[in-house]
Amino acid sequence: MKPNYPVIRGEILKILYSAHPDWCNIKLIQFTLDDLGYVVSEEAIASELHYLTEKIDKVRPLVELQEKQIPGRKQKMLLAKITAWGIDLIENRLEIPDADKNWIVL
């Protein structure tokens, strides 16, 4: 069964909101989603995080991303944190036109 990505995006934003002001790595997001009953790959989470950086527009991203090199690892780790725009969306202070509300479920 295909994941319900609007719901997954909402859950990711809530996870980042709960962690604010700290950064979260994809593993933490994945474990939390799994605890909530959503089985989502790291690749899919990364894709949704990138989506959330550009959804409204590039001037008002909902999520900020950063790649960090971890000593002893070849690959960089993707970190994410919620922006002020993302917080406003979670706290219902950011208006989304009705025609465009199907991309996220909060």
Image: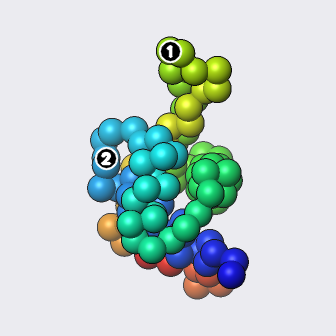
As drawn, the label of residue 71 is 1
Which residue is nearer to you in this view: 71 or 15? 71
Quarter holding residue 1: bottom right
Which residue is nearer to you in this view: 46 or 1? 1
Quadrant in the picture for the C terminus: bottom left
As drawn, the label of residue 92 is none
Which residue is nearer to you in this view: 43 or 97? 43
State whether residue 99 appears in this view: yes
Report the amino acid beneath label 2: His
- Residue 11 x, y percent position in the rendering: 45, 67
Answer left or right for 9 relative to 50.
left
SS label for mark 1: loop
- Residue 88 x, y percent position in the rendering: 38, 61
Decide which of tag 1 and tag 2 comes sooner along the chain. Answer: 2
Answer left or right for 82 relative to 51.
left
Crowding at dot 2, Cα within 10 Å, few <14 / some 14-19 / many 20+, comes out as some
Question: In the displayed image of the protein, which residue is found farthest to the bottom?
Answer: 98
Quarter holding residue 78: top right
Work out whether 15 lies above or below 98.
Answer: above
Work out whether 69 lies above or below 9.
Answer: above
Which residue shows up at 55% across the image and 67% down it? 39
Question: In the displayed image of the protein, which residue is found farthest to the front?
Answer: 72
